[in-house]
Amino acid sequence: MSLLSVRDLSISFGGVKAVDNVSFDVEPGEVFTIVGPNGAGKSTIFNLISRIYDPSSGSISFDGQDITRSRADEIAPLGIARTFQNIELFEHSTVMHNLLVGQHSRRTTSWLSDALFLPATRREEHNMREKAEQVIDFLDLQPYRDKLIAGLPYGVRKVVEIARGLASDPRLLLLDEPASGLSVEETQDMAFWIEDMQKDLGITILMVEHDMSLVNQVSDRVLALADGRSLAFGTAEEVQSHPDVIAAYLGVEEDA
Amino acid sequence: MRIHFKTGYGQDIRLFEDSREAVQNALLILAAVSAPWWLDEYMLGEVTYVLIWILAGLGLMILAGHTGQPSLGHGAFLACGAYMEVILLEAGVPFVLSLPLAGLFAGVVGAVVAIPALRMSGIYLAIATLAFGIMTEDIIILLTPWTGGIEGVFTPTISLLGIEIDRYGDPDRFYWLCLFVVILITVGYKNILRSPTGRAFTAIRDSEVSARAMGVNVARMKTLAFGLSCFVTGLAGALLAHYLTAFNYEAFLILISIQLLLMVTVGGLGSIHGAYYGAIVIGLLPVVIATLRQEISDFLGAGNSSVPGMETAIFAVIIVAFIIYEPLGIYGRWTKIRIWLELFPLARKDMFRRQKSYLKTERMK
Ligand SMILES: Nc1ncnc2c1ncn2[C@@H]1O[C@H](COP(=O)(O)OP(=O)(O)OP(=O)(O)O)[C@@H](O)[C@H]1O
Ligand SMILES: [Mg+2]
């Protein structure tokens, strides 16, 4: 059974069909990539899955459970974590603090227990910090552990955002353009981390990415979108050589 | 710069960062507890008043400073606590119960007010809460049978487990009572900040979309923040009732709400210290201005005649200056001075990049 299943999903913004009847299935353990020109609707699909937007039609199910009408905060506890295209970290907090918030969906204590700092809260804090340290080690974030996000370089923030997602122990990780704005070396590191997350941690990854070298390197399957509609589907090579995809990219270049 | 070598997770969870901080706090508490022996009665009264303001400020800080929800109507919750305290004491409820119940009442009102407020943020929330603050006087007058309306009410004397605590008769005891409540709430506040609840609050402040994606139930957490915030401010209101001994609706004019928000802003939004510094400055500033008024009048060449509106003007200038030059408040300024001293002579000018202030208006993802 596929882990994430998207069926005939559509949404429009003021008459513009941002996502138009899109269907796909993400299988457990794979890296599934969505490509497409700017404005194709890729981030909108992510926002639909994380329930920030309500679809006008279609359905989304995760691990056999229908989440089309779930609240946004009910998604993380199911085991879906995400990053944002424009980095949405908690700016005034440290890296560690961000990783701890990342684990919010696993919290078990009440606010009263927190206010009194009862043993249950103390134990939970201990466990959360242990988990955060593991993620920090995994992504080599030790030098930034106690640094405020506001002062970190762009490339590091990208990694911290992934770390925050990993801290929740997700089964599915949504990465919105993980390599955008990164240098060639940083992009290469990102490719290794994505492979590590897939192979060592067994996390399924749904990714949006423009950098074709990264797409080719890590993707198991690729879906190409343009103007909200799916154009082609298959391996990275198949999709890139598909005439419609080439036309869509060329069309965009001609417009520009 | 102090460097901490971390050797265990417990170290990060501790109430105080290091033993130096613990010692500092212990000395501070010692000084505060012994204040009645080295302060005269007038100053002790002023300090007690500042303590009550600190408590009210701590309440607002939870909401405005840590959850990023500005409230311009917190005077209303001060009123809830104050009137409920009087009503409960008159009904024969003992003080040990009436104080927490008065706070609880304000907290519940706050949580209910939060429901329509959930859909608002930034400037819209500020205006809605402002409206609530303005309505407070009218509501108090409408509820005359319980609040005494224009005539006002007298606060019964506290009898705590058989010990009489009269604000004028036993100023020392009343001061200790206020100090005890402030310390208790501060510890609870610190606990919240170092645990998931507090982190969820700051997450909502910094990025609501992100907080949602992490599984934070934003509506529930905001309601909780409102509730806790109003509970603490309500406690301050109950103590204020005893401090004033007799009061009417005029104690809760909209100016009080505005002053409260100014206090936490000047003190430093987003830090517990900020509530303390803000209350000390706003609480003691009028006293300082009054003492210096002759000098200031001379300086302005006004001779012996006082300059009308001078206090208010000085007040306003200080506040505007803070908001322009130090959006992180007194606490932010102090942190920078401390780091500069610790690093001397290595500090660089560009080390403190201008930071955005915490209160944001509209924010899209
Ligand atoms: N909240 C919104 N309100 C109005 N229109 C929106 C909204 N979100 C997305 N859109 C529109 O939907 C379309 C798809 O946007 P989306 O952000 O999904 O593109 P994308 O494929 O992620 O592009 P990019 O590669 O630039 O990130 C665009 O035309 C965009 O303007
Ligand atoms: Mg996008």
Image (cartoon, helix red, strand yellow):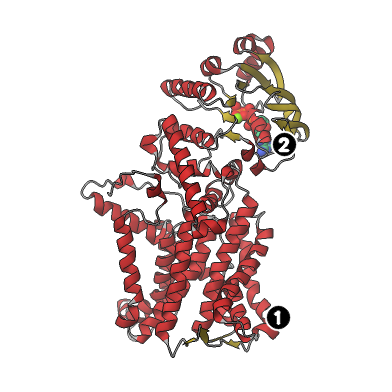
Q: Position of residue A182 (x, y in %)?
A: 46, 26
Q: Which residue lies furthest to the front in this view?
A: A119
Examine the rendered structure and indicate whether residue B182 appears above or below residue A174. below
Local crowd at mark 1 within 10 Å, few (<14), some, or many (≥20)?
A: few
Q: In this view, does A197 lie to the left or right of A6?
A: left
As helix, strand or loop, the secondary structure at mark 1 comes to helix
Question: Mark on residue B142?
Answer: 1
Would you say the beta carbon of the disc 1 residue lies within 8 angstroms of ligand 1? no
User: Residue A153, located in which quarter of the rendered image?
Assistant: top left
- Whether residue A63 is visible, yes or no, is yes
Q: Position of residue B100 (x, y in %)?
A: 57, 73
Q: In this view, does B143 lie to the left or right of B320?
A: right
The chain under label 2 reads A
* Residue at x 60%, y 18% (from the top left corner): A253
* Residue at x 67%, y 9% (from the top left corner): A243
Q: Name the residue under label 2.
A: A67
